[in-house]
Amino acid sequence: MTQKDLPQKILPLHTTMKFILAVLAITGVAQAAEEKDDLAHVVTLGTRPYYLVDEMNDGALKEKLEECAKTTTNFVKSDFSIGHRGACAGIIECDVTFTKDKELICRHAQCDLHTSTDVVLRPELNAKCSVPFSAGVSPNLFAARWTHQGVSMGRNADWRTDLYQYSCPVIPTHKESIELIKSFNGKFTPELKSADVEMPYEGTYTQEDYAQQMIDEYIEAGIDPKSVWPQSFNTDDVIYWVKNTGFGDQAVALDDKYEATEEEYRAWHKLLKDNGVKIVAPPMWMLVKDDPNSEYDISPSAYADSAKEHGLQVLTWTLERTGPGLDGWYWQSVADSFQNLDYRQ
């Protein structure tokens, strides 16, 4: 795909802002106050945003963005932005899993090394896979089957971009990610990934040990709990942090129970509240629904109402893996409200 193949239309600014404001009003999310000292680093955007504006069709939105580009020269990161795979945000995620020697590393999943590194292309490493790659055979590589030293031998697969890498990337430990984010005064939202091996691992390493180890590494690094939002899809992990660590006040209960009935998610919200959990995190579409009679053409979902009724704060996943326009998985509950928008005004 070339630059010319990229979409030239984006959602009008006034509509985008209405949608964002509506979601914020529904969920009760407020932008965290920026700390001038911690978030004073200038963010470099590069040329791409300006290229995209230049390629837009003529219209009011393009004129507004061109004026913004002329007058805005300094950018700062904000706690309001949470980066899953990028460091321009104020709060940055590391997906955490463990190796055979119980070292915590940053990986999207415990069993993904064969899909995201070059280990299967290197015979000496491929031989160590639980299911080595060969013609017609899908490889399988659990991080928990390798020591950290072994995992660190893998490199970014050559079909993944290294455009913004200044050296050959290696798989970082969780401790290394803490030091990196700390070095530019960022904040932290580690996600404890589910294990793909039976727990307790090797009969002794329990889920609680795993959850505690992640927190211990922030304690060892001298990180203030107010700068950490630990998260997990495992409710027991979140409750453990609340009841057993000083990092429970901002523990985040991630929600992937997309097919839950109203009765089920209300019971879950009550369970969270009763155990001191304060933050729930579903995808954005679970919080809103089409409503042509409302000010923004959308209104709170029953899920959002339940979270509010149970006193839960809300963080939500928004734009990850989103293609051009307001279409796809993240927008499924409000598709009707946006399908007839004029993208040129």
Image: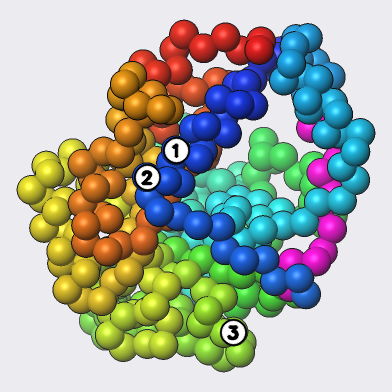
Q: Secondary structure at mark 3?
A: loop
Res. 248 in view: yes
Quarter of the figure with residue 271: bottom left
**First reached walking from the N terminus: tag 2 or tag 3:** 2
- In which quadrant is the N terminus drawn? top right
Give the overall secondary structure of the magenta segment: loop
Residue positioned 35% across, 26% down in the render: 294
Q: Are marks 3 and 1 in contact (CB under 8 Å)?
A: no
Mark sitting on residue 286: none
> Depth check: 102 or 296 in front?
296
- Name the residue type under label 2: Ile
> Depth check: 7 or 144 in front?
7
Task: Give the labeled residue for mark 1.
Answer: 22
User: In the rendered structure, which segment of residues is drawn in magenta?
Assistant: 38-50
Residue positioned 84% across, 26% down in the render: 66
Task: Give the labeled residue for mark 3.
Answer: 223
**Left or right: 42 as drawn, with respect to 272:** right
Res. 144 in view: no
Q: Are marks 2 and 1 in contact (CB under 8 Å)?
A: yes
Q: Is residue 41 in the magenta section? A: yes
Residue 200 in the image, given as x and y percentages of width and height: 24, 77
Q: Secondary structure at mark 2?
A: helix
Q: Is residue 345 in the magenta section? A: no
Compute the Cα span from label 3 to label 1. 34 Å
**Left or right: 47 as drawn, with respect to 249:** right
Residue positioned 60% across, 21% down in the render: 11
- Name the residue type under label 3: Ile
Residue 228 in the image, given as x and y percentages of width and height: 52, 74
**First reached walking from the N terminus: tag 3 or tag 1:** 1
Task: Give the labeled residue for mark 2.
Answer: 26
